[in-house]
Amino acid sequence: TNNKGTAKIQPDGSFKVKNIDYFNGSLIQFAGQDLPVRYDPFDASRAYVCGTSGWTEGLSLYSSELAGRTEKEIAAISLEINANNSRT
């Protein structure tokens, strides 16, 4: 999970876990609420929110790039991208 174990659902049904945005249109009904979240550290392409009907999957907009990547791989890639961006 993230540090709080919850995420605030945005008006468009998105939520953020570990600085990655996830989306599921069915979450719009929970906009503004902090709900429990979970994620798979071995597949950062998806995360889960617990609403009134149970756990709902959210997909990252970058799911094809993140699929199957671990949390550590993503952290290493992020460091590299940030280093490249700071040089320009």
Image (cartoon, rainbow, N blue to C red):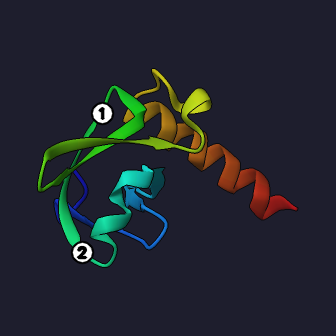
Q: Nearer the viewer, mark 2 or mark 1?
A: 2
Residue identifier under label 1 = 41
Residue 70 drawn at (x, y percent)? 40, 28
Q: Position of residue 84 (x, y in %)?
A: 77, 51
Residue behind mark 2: 33
**At 67% across and 56% down in the image, what residue appears?**
82
- Mark 1 is on which residue type? Pro
* Secondary structure found at label 2: loop
Q: How many marks?
A: 2
Question: Residue drawn at (34%, 58%), measured in percent from left and top?
Answer: 27
Q: Nearer the viewer, residue 58 or 20?
A: 58
| Circle 1 SS class | loop
Q: Quadrant of the C terminus?
A: bottom right
Query: Which residue shows up at 48% across the image and 31% down it?
Result: 73
Q: 12 left or right of 47?
A: right
Amino acid type indicated by mark 2: Gln
Q: CA distance from mark 2 to mark 1?
A: 24 Å
Instruction: Pick whichever, 87 or 64, lies toward us.
Output: 64
